[in-house]
Amino acid sequence: MRELALIVAVLAAFLCAPWLTDSGVVLNFLIMVLFATLLGQAWNILGGYGGQFSFGHAAFFGTGAYAMAVLQTVFAVNPWLALPLAILCGVLVALVIGVLSFRYGLRGSYFALVTLAFAEVLRILANTFDFTGAGVGLQLPLREAAGNMQFADKTGYLYLVLSFVAFGLMLSWWLRHSRYGAWLSAVRDNEASALALGIDALRVKLAAIMLSAALMAAAGAFYLQYFHYIDPHIAYGPAISIEALVGAIVGGLGSVFGPLLGALVLHLLGEATRNLMGDLPGISLVVYGVVLVLIVMFIPRGLSGLFGRRA
Amino acid sequence: MLSILFPSLLNGVATGAIYALIALGLTLIYGVLHIVNFAHGAALMVALYGVYFLFTAWHVDPYLALPIMIVAMFCFGYGLQRFVIGRASHGKDEYILLVTLGIAIILENLALALFRSDTHSIDTAYTLATVDVFGALIALPKLIAFFGALAVSSALLLLIGRTQLGRAIRAVAREKQGARVVGIDVEHIYAMSFGIGMACLGAAACFLLPAYYVNPLVGNGFVLIAFTIVVLGGMGSFAGALIGGLIVGVVESLGGLWLGESLGQIGIFVIFIAVLLFRPQGLFGQKGA
Amino acid sequence: MKPAILEARNLAISFGGLKAVADVSLTVAAGSLTALIGPNGAGKSTLFAMISGFLAPDAGTVHFDGRLLSGLPPYAICRLGLARTFQIVQPFAAQTVRENIAVGSHLHEPRRRQALALADAVAERLGLAGELDKPAGSLTTAGRKRLELARALATRPRLLLLDEVLAGLNPQEVAGMIPVIRGICDEGVTVLMIEHVMQAVMNLAEDIWVLANGCLIAHGGPQQVTRDGAVIEAYLGKGMAARLAALDEPDAPGAPGKSDGAAHD
């Protein structure tokens, strides 16, 4: 119950932020932290609770973003209706990748590599076909209205991404207190034992990759609405996969608040580095890489591991 | 038809030889340390920049830079394994993979911050020279790369097969505990193998740059290609890496011919996924994943 | 004769041309405590793996409670009420003892709180009540063996396959486990156990199957099996049966009631 109270407190704090400041810079920082949290939460479901490390989570992110863009620009679907459809598309991609990889027993490094390859295939496809705008990408026409999921000020976007993160927090909490979560951890820790105890490991893993993809696709949809633009490199390139993975691992695998903690620490470090060294391209990713290596070397349980057991 | 097919095939074989050399380094590291080195592409990028700066700053010809790059990359790899990767494993595959991923991220973005995203190539007297091979014109640097890659690969096979060091490496690869018992310094052999794997990249960079280019993200393209080759040939198999390299080179070249530049790359990934799913031990390996 | 709850017919499997199990047929009577014994490498664990769905036999069938198990995956077999333990214990090391057992009790109990309560009850029965909050990885060998048993028991099986739950325990710990296993059987769970600790087998089992080199060589009650020439030869080597008979020692190896009855190979 203390965890639930903490979830409510954290959400309330973010909810109040727009009353405390109207600085666009601060709000933008909070939005980007929440966006990174969402990516980390998504990765944490499959990687943290499920123990399946994916290097290609951009496959779901990009699919969500592109589905959202194509539905709006080509089929003139309202974004609020396009959102669930975009999430569904991400989940379907996850189902295909999951069935293929898990059915043939891929795990560990092999699973990581095959997910990366799937993301690359999608990137090449998005780069080739006209309806995804090929290499140029897709631009969302600017029509600011809440009914069009385009907000006049940052508060609207903050609340939109916050609602996704809230869902992610609840999902994460549920995984720690439910039969499905227990099954998922069992499959992660020892698949043979899980099978012997009556757990259909394949289905459990499939459900995990689909849940994970749903959050990832929601993040992709949010990205499109916030920046009004998507191209193959942003959608399916390695940057998003890395951000998702590093945030989750730095924060602590299989923990409820880990992704939020990881995203906050990484973005603060990124800001600090930019202030210190100037806005060099890639410098914040250098920080991510250094933090990832240091965390894996010295505190593999992640930052939240420092505050008690799997908090 | 044949008039386009043959040069394309020839180009594919030449590129494939370079790929094979890159993959040899990866498969050596996998075979001995049983780790998937995700930083392989980024390390190649570092080597390419090395060759590039040797040429532009000190006018060292890429082919003359060969011994320098081999030694430099060997030292880089030895240190990396000894002081970073080896200390972070905690006995879990995934952690090693994450550390090598972290190293790849650091190297790539450091290059991006230092050298910006501009693409560089070098201009030598022979850059544009071509040679007539049975009626097909092929770039001279590519031809040199083909024979150079074969020569370095042969040297590597001799090193592993015929020397004291090679014997120790094979012993560690086969039976780590046993090797330790007979007095082999396993940590040292691990670092040596990693260093040799990186040295292959140093050599590959020297042959590659005159016919290619360098930018901070150039390694990305090679990582999956190298993994495809290694998986295709069977993780840890040298012969497999050589043949796999040639196959992938040809597939890429022909894929580009038929599907166009952009979609052409897809063939490699499809092979990669298919092999991982349906034949994880590779085409030539006996047992694997 | 009680009806058979498990019936294996003509099971066979080979690995790379090597016959691990050849044409084995055995039955386990409902409610019984049956043992499967045999020297190392006899194929006992392989037989368990085929019964529990972890290995697909090359030939033969398994019926559980009259139902054909062929082709069913392990989890489906467990759901039918046939649970197993592993010879090399496989705990979820990072999770607590309570969480480990709850994975088993979740099979028939979707609610978390209730599953955890059931886990507590099972732990109580197996003498693990004091360890509930410890991570499974921190348990002693004896503790892990109990946990392995507890998890399987929490799935509420009707037939329990125990693969050497006594191996690696000291005589005191073995003595502590014997009543636990007896208790499980008394509550109506049929038990088929692979065991090397002869003292326990002689104490517990009413029915014994003996496997050697992938073939069944004997079947019967404890007294019957220990006098069987083929069994003695399988354990002690060729010619030993004759020599023992010549000596006519009443203290034949494996005889019940002695302090050190473990059969070594």
Image: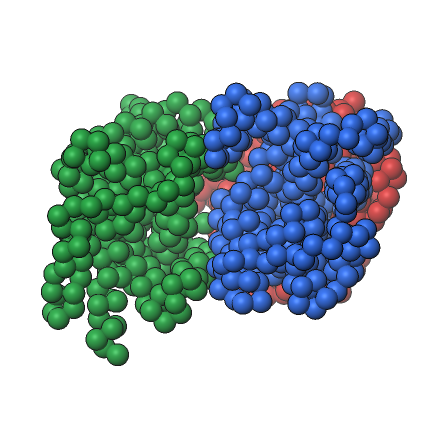
Who is closer to the viewer here, A108 or C110?
Answer: A108
Residue at (22%, 71%) from the top-left corner? B6
Say above or below: B15 vs C147: below
Quadrant of residue B50 within the rendered picture: top left
Place of residue C207 in the rendered image (x, y in percent of width and height, measured from the top left): 70, 48
Say above or below: A170 vs A214: above
Q: Colour of chain A?
A: blue
In this rendering, would C250 be left or right of A128?
A: right
In this rendering, would C248 be left or right of C29?
A: left
Say above or below: A139 vs C181: below
Residue at (65%, 42%) from the top-left corner? A39
Place of residue B113 in the rendered image (x, y in percent of width and height, measured from the top left): 43, 32
Q: Colour of chain C?
A: red
Chain identifier, colour green: B
In this rendering, would B173 be left or right of A238?
A: left
Who is closer to the viewer here, C66 or A267?
Answer: A267
Place of residue A245 in the rendered image (x, y in percent of width and height, measured from the top left): 58, 39
